[in-house]
Amino acid sequence: MADRETLYGKTPEELAALCGGLGMPRFAARQIARWLYVRHTEDPLLMTDIAAVHRQRLAEAFAPAFSAPERVTESADGTKKYLFRIPGGHFIESAYIPDGERATLCVSSQAGCRMGCKFCATGRQGLQRSLTAAEILNQIVSLPERDKLTNVVFMGMGEPLDNTREVLRALEILTAEWGFGWSPTRITLSTAGVVPELRRFLDATKVHLAVSLHNPFHEERAEIMPVERAWPVAEVAAILREYDFTHQRRVSFEYIVMSGLNDSPRHIRELTRLLNGIKCRINLIRFHKIPDSPYFSPDDAAMIRFRDALTARGIQTTIRASRGEDIQAACGLLSTKGAQ
């Protein structure tokens, strides 16, 4: 599989180019795309509206992309964590989160992550490699609950904007008429704030954005998120003020609350100043303990006080319920460091 490309993950334009290279009519690209992304069939030999000789050429030239998860772990709250093996001997995890009529899949964009956030198990793992669009989409297509999904969030392992090309390709396939045909409002991408790629993402897509904030003060954020040294969150906020989030597209700020570290009245005041002029929401997330971490989670009363104080200052603020913590599937806990 590592030696041959996959058909899955290619756009119609790319499919048309490869058709030309194989001596096939370029219009076959749309037929192939329909098989791949509407019928979720990647075996060229099953693409019955394509000439048999061309099917054979495709089968010989391209490797399969789909691979089923190797392991599933189920939480007491119904969350499921899936482990996928990818070429190169690496692993990734996805989290399936059912919630009434909603069912959300948290997908990974990289095996590991190089952002190095100190509160995140994936960051401790380091970066093994970035995923291809096919490997990102395989987490959706090969999910046993695929047909139940209502939403996908790029909040799993990795920094999506450290793999912008393949992530944008996956988003295009998910939302295009010739692809999955999903509304962009069903998808959210989370970033720690990779400024050089942020405009590219905002201009190329209409999916929702979530910014991992966690501290509004430059020096304090840099202590727990090295990305702040390269791209201060103040620069991220300045870019976001240039875009319109008053209609369907939304921007939110993820804020992991760590007791005594980022939950004081001065943090509330600075958050209000930093986010002034941006129509947004803050999602408060209780810190989930990872081994040898110096950080602690606040109690419920402290979370509510923090939420209410921000709401009183005019910022829509919610407390995100923790899901899958007992199986290490909650926010910041995904890691395949010990996977076999």
Image (tube, rainbow, N blue to C red):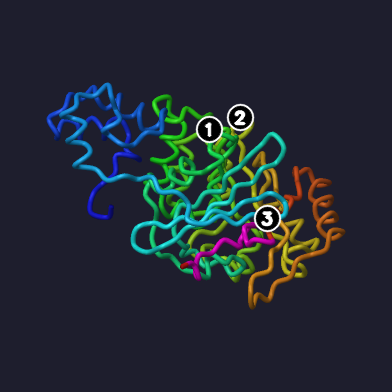
Q: Disc 2 vs disc 1: Cβ atoms closer than 8 Å?
A: yes
In space, the residues marked 3 and 1 are separated at their CA atoms by 29 Å
Amino acid type of the residue tagged 2 in the rendering = Gln
**188 and 40: which one is in front?**
40
**Residue at 73% in and 69% down:** 261
Which element type, helix, strand or loop, lies under badge 3? Answer: loop
Asked if residue 132 shows in the view, the reply is yes
Magenta stretch, main secondary structure, is loop
Please provide the residue range marked out in magenta.
326-339
**Residue at 74% in and 51% down:** 321
Whether residue 336 is in magenta: the answer is: yes
Q: Position of residue 152 (x, y in %)?
A: 55, 41
Q: Position of residue 107 (x, y in %)?
A: 52, 49
Examine the image and state in which quarter residue 167 appears.
top left
Q: Disc 3 vs disc 1: Cβ atoms closer than 8 Å?
A: no
Which of the marked residues, 2 or 3, is nearer the chain's N terminus?
Answer: 3
Q: What residue is shown with label 2?
A: 248
Q: Position of residue 276 (x, y in %)?
A: 68, 46
Q: What residue is shown with label 1?
A: 184
- Left or right: residue 25 versus residue 71 is left
Amino acid type of the residue tagged 1 in the rendering = Pro
Q: Position of residue 217 (x, y in %)?
A: 65, 63
Which marked residue is nearer to the observer: mark 3 or mark 1? 3
Farthest residue in the left direction?
A: 23
